[in-house]
Amino acid sequence: MIDNSYFTYDGNRGTNIESAIKLASESFETSSHRRNVQKVIVIVASAYESGNYDDPTKIAKSFIQDGGFIATVEYLQEHGNPVPLLNTLSSGPEYSFTNRFRNLTAEQIRQAFCRMFPSKTKFWIGLKYLAATGLYQWSDGTYLWSSDFQMWAPGYPNANAGYCVYMYQYTGFSYGWFNDECSDDQNYICQTVPCSADNYCATRD
């Protein structure tokens, strides 16, 4: 439960989606952001009122034209009204979701993210070989144990080919994990913690 005493009302009546997109875009430009990571913004909203804020359509279109993707989730509460603006902000109808018909699943959204990578695209999965331990470690610090799920391609793992691991559709419908040099230029598949009630992001002018 949220204690309302921790929040103060600043007098704004609108929903500042334009500022939210700007804030997310700026986070992609920081030095800590890896340049090959696909830039994806997920907007979840149950209402939209323009108030005194700028129309977010322009900045959303600019973000998409610069190579980013925007997925929108229309989250309708009971007796809530549709939010048609969200459809105009997404990268396309396949990236626009709604729970209006109560059949929206997390798997649908995950599959949409997978479609952002064309076939035959190599992308890092956040797994790296540690010579000191002889084990593979995920980017969150956990280890890949022999009992864990693995998708090594035939002939792999092979640390002699490199310490970092990418995934690749190497034939037909077959995907697998491959070793490669960590300095090689591949795409990334990862997420960053979004701005939310649990993860406060400072407002930027």
Image (cartoon, rainbow, N blue to C red):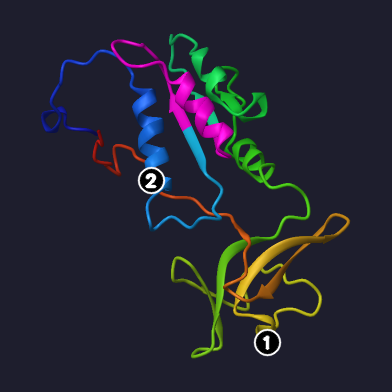
Q: Residues within 10 Å of mark 2 (few under 14, many from 20)?
A: some
* Residue found at x 48% / y 67%: 139
Task: State left or right for residue 76 relative to residue 158.
Answer: left
Instruction: Return the residue nearer the eye: 80 or 66.
Output: 66
Decide if residue 153 is on the left or right side of residue 135: right
Rendered-image quadrant of the N terminus: top left
The span picked out in magenta is 43-70
Task: Say what secondary structure mark 1 lies in.
Answer: helix
Judging by the rendered image, the residue that carries numbered circle 2 is 27
Q: Amino acid at mark 1?
A: Asn
Q: Is residue 177 above or below residue 66?
A: below
Residue furthest to the right in view is 172
Residue 143 point in image, percent of width and height: 51, 75
Q: Is residue 180 above or below residue 13?
A: below
Question: Mark 2 or 1 closer to N-term?
Answer: 2
Give the residue pinned by disc 1: 160
Tell me residue 99's x, y (percent): 55, 22
Closer to us: 70 or 110: 70
> Is 101 colored magenta in this rendering?
no
Question: Decide: marks 2, 1 in contact (CB < 8 A)?
Answer: no
Occupied quadrant, residue 107: top right
161 versus 57 height, above or below:
below
Q: Nearer the viewer, residue 147 or 184?
A: 184
Q: Residue at x 44, y 71 (%)?
A: 141
Judge the density around disc 1: few (<14), some (14-19), many (≥20) Cα neighbours within 10 Å.
few
